[in-house]
């Protein structure tokens, strides 16, 4: 799949924003955070979520109908995501206002924010995980990875040792995801044979292309990244998203300025991870271009 | 609504015979023409008369070669690819705006362009690459089964079929109701074993394909013998052969 920067930025930034909001919510519920910190970190979370949503808006080819995307929640994960994120962000704004004015907070609102922001991240991940056409996404590892990426990122600023646990879970899921992605089509039944109505092992190859130039399908869904480059990018991603943050947090526990640096490095790693998430994903339409 | 209807009445679709298709792209051209005429509907092209043209098509014809296991010869065939109007259409259920829908009365899958926001998710959900986002208008395009022809009251009755079916010079494309066991398309599917594309995707396509028949060993070896006979030919053919061999 084509790794479009607008979509990568959307999933990275809004993932981080909602991750931060969910951690703030959890701490608010457990009374482990000051009213001042709720305001500051909720505003940061809000900022990143909104930047992410704006970036996804730029991916739309017909922006004037974007508002209609809230209508099909009964079947569409993208619609659920639109509703859930707007709903969640409105509560965040309300919570910020209340805490700012009253200088105290309602614990129960915290748990609602925690669950709602996790659900929002889940709906984002299901946009990809629901697609049978892309087997490397079409499993529960995709939501697990998205949720723990967001939680790990969100926890870096607010938690010390607990963020190590979340980072660790993220790291394990990330490696598992790459492992499964490498296996995906080996276990599936699709081939150029089944794409054309024959059996899976039919010996068929394209001898001419159907059009003189590239087209929307090729640009959007038949993206090929060289295997040796992909492996290199995996190392960079894993080092920046996981190894460096882990080591820095262990070396400087509770150091806030270090954790800002860690977030920056972590972002770079997650960006590469998401880039690979798209670039390495093989869509079934590519079999017609075998 | 992106909830899928039952479609108990009619299931309109195409039956495509890969044994008959000669890969002339006639259906591609006539589809593009029909769906680009008129004021509102356009299948746009960019750089159409310059270098690197790209354009939107609802139908594309691929070419493949396939190894015949009994003769070890490669056999070529052509493969027209367009929307299969799936019963369990994933492109419809993923659509957030409700622009994509499946008609209850005949099962045709359509896009309401006034609602589409051009997110492209339906194109990702279709296993067959049947949907293309129009880069000029920013809305999703797909085969309509020529819904504006098949129910037209203005066109003469014999023209009330999809334009690809009408224009195919070899009759490789048939249009009909797959829900009616007595329709021509249903009969042919039974007689010649019509197949689904990527059945493992569980989309339950309405359109069916008839696969190219495998050429028998005898048919392939007789090609060689005809050629040999001609080189030994006597009479007029022999004279032509000898005359030409001098050069
Ligand atoms: S072929 Fe593709 S676009 Fe057509 S109904 Fe099936 S999934 Fe949808
Ligand atoms: S591109 Fe249009 S029709 Fe397709 S899913 Fe998005 S809004 Fe629906």
Image (cartoon, rainbow, N blue to C red):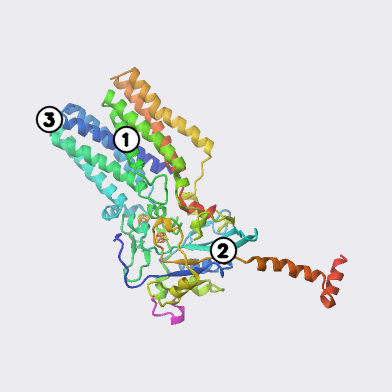
- Location of residue B203 with respect to B223 vertically, above or below: above
Splitting the image into four quadrants, where does ligand 2 fall? bottom left
> What residue would you read off at disc 2?
B78
Identify the residue position indicated by label 3 in the image. Answer: A104
Decide whether residue A160 is among the magenta residues: no
Task: Examine the residues drawn in magenta and state their main secondary structure.
Answer: loop
Q: Chain of mark 2?
A: B
Tag 1 and tag 3 share a subunit: yes
Q: Nearer the viewer, mark 3 or mark 2?
A: 2
Residue positioned 29% across, 36% down in the render:
A17
Earlier residue among tags 1 and 3: 3
Quadrant location of residue B83? bottom left
The magenta span reads B151-160
Q: Which residue is mark 1?
A: A148
- Please state the chain letter of the residue tagged with numbered disc 1 in the rendered image: A
Q: Secondary structure at mark 2?
A: strand
């Amino acid at each position: 799949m084509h790794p479009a920067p607008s979509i990568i930025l959307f999933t990275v930034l809004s993932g981080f924003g909602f991750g931060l909001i969910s951690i703030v919510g959890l701490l608010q519920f457990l009374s482990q955070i000051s009213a001042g910190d709720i305001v500051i970190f909720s505003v940061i979370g809000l900022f990143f979520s909104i930047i992410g949503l704006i970036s996804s808006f730029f991916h739309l080819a017909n922006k004037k109908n974007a508002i209609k995307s809230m209508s099909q929640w009964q079947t569409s994960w993208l619609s659920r995501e639109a509703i859930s994120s707007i709903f969640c962000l409105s509560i965040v704004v309300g919570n910020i206002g209340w805490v700012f004015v009253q200088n105290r907070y309602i614990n129960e609102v915290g748990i609602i924010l925690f669950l709602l922001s996790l659900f929002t991240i889940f709906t984002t991940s299901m946009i990809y995980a629901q697609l049978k056409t892309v087997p490397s996404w079409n499993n529960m590892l995709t939501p697990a990875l998205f949720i723990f990426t967001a939680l790990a990122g969100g926890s870096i600023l607010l938690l010390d040792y607990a963020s190590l646990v979340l980072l660790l879970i993220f790291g394990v899921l990330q490696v598992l995801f790459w492992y499964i992605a490498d296996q995906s089509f080996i276990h599936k039944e699709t081939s150029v044979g089944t794409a054309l109505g024959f059996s899976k092992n039919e010996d068929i190859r394209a001898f001419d292309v159907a059009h003189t130039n590239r087209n929307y399908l090729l640009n959007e869904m038949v993206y090929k990244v060289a295997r040796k480059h992909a492996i290199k990018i995996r190392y960079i991603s894993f080092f920046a998203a996981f190894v460096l943050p882990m080591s820095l947090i262990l070396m400087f526990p509770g150091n806030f300025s270090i954790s800002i640096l860690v977030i920056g490095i972590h972002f770079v790693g997650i960006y590469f991870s998401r880039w690979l998430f798209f670039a390495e994903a093989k869509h079934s339409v590519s079999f017609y271009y075998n | 609504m992106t909830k899928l209807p039952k479609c108990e009445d009619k299931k309109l679709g195409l039956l495509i015979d890969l044994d008959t298709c000669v890969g002339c792209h006639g259906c591609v051209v006539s589809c593009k023409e029909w769906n680009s005429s008129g004021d509102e509907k356009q299948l746009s092209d960019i750089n159409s008369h310059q270098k690197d043209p790209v354009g939107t098509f609802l139908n594309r014809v691929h070419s493949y070669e396939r190894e015949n296991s009994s003769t070890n010869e490669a056999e070529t065939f052509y493969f027209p690819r367009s929307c299969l109007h799936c019963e369990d259409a994933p492109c419809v259920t993923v659509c957030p705006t409700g622009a994509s829908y499946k008609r209850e009365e005949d099962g045709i899958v359509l896009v309401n362009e006034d609602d589409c926001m051009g997110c492209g998710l339906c194109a990702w959900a279709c296993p067959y690459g049947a949907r293309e986002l129009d880069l000029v208008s920013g809305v999703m395009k797909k085969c309509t089964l020529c819904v504006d022809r098949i129910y037209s009251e203005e066109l003469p009755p014999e023209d009330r079929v999809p334009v690809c079916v009408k224009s195919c010079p070899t009759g490789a494309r048939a249009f009909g109701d797959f829900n009616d066991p007595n329709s021509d398309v249903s009969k042919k599917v039974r007689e010649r074993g019509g197949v689904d594309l990527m059945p493992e995707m569980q989309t339950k396509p309405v359109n069916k394909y008839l696969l190219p028949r495998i050429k028998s060993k005898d048919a392939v070896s007789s090609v060689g013998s005809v050629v040999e006979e001609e080189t030994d030919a006597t009479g007029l053919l022999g004279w032509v052969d000898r005359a030409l061999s001098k050069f």
